[in-house]
Amino acid sequence: MKNFLPCLMLLCALLQLGCTKVVYTHEQVVDLYKTKQDLIKAFKMPTEKKTNDSTEEWLYRYDRNTSLTDHSIAEFPNVVTTNVTEFSKFKRYIIFTIDKRGNVIMCYYKGVDLAVRKKNTGGTIALIALGVLLVAMSYVGSQTISFSYVP
């Protein structure tokens, strides 16, 4: 029975990691945004904007979803853009640097993953089957050891 708990914990960890597969990485998604118009279309208005002589930086704030079942992050709903000289401190954000011609030249992010994932049903079924098999083998093994006769 003492092997049962670690096997159950391993099964839970595997289920958390194995239910999706990455279709597009974060870098591939960020590379899709080439111009200021692309950013506006995808992200709408930035939370904060900082303007220099040759560039403009747009910060989009992200927050963790408040739902207990959804652990994803979502863009913070923004109504108006604030012009700042220094960006505010947020835990999760993405900053796009735009040149004077309106081209995105750089992206910096913290705590944000824009990777596109899709559910991997076959992998999930295989993972659950493997986990059930491991738990069953652990349980049978613990029962066999517990009741073995030593003369």
Image (cartoon, helix red, strand yellow):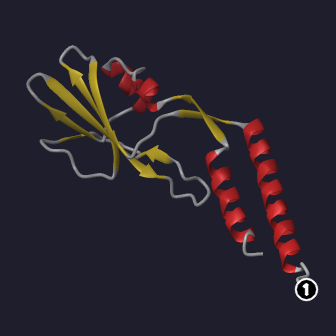
Q: Specify the farthest residue to the left.
A: 53
Q: SS for tag 1?
A: loop
Q: In the image, is residue 9 above or below residue 50?
A: below
Q: Amino acid at mark 1?
A: Pro
Residue 19: quarter of image: top right
Q: Quadrant of the C terminus?
A: bottom right
Residue 85: quarter of image: top left
Q: In the image, is residue 26 above or below residue 36?
A: below
Which is nearer the eye, 41 or 108? 108
Which is nearer the eye, 124 or 147? 147
Residue at 71% of width from left, 63% of height from top? 7
Residue at 33% of width from left, 53% of height from top? 91
Q: How many marks?
A: 1
Residue 49: quarter of image: top left
Which is nearer the eye, 137 or 9? 137
Q: In the image, is residue 14 above or below residue 42?
A: below
- 95 left or right of 117? left
Q: Position of residue 148 (x, y in %)?
A: 89, 78
Q: Position of residue 129 (x, y in %)?
A: 82, 49
- 127 left or right of 53? right
Residue at 45% of width from left, 39% of height from top? 113
Q: Position of residue 3 (x, y in %)?
A: 73, 70
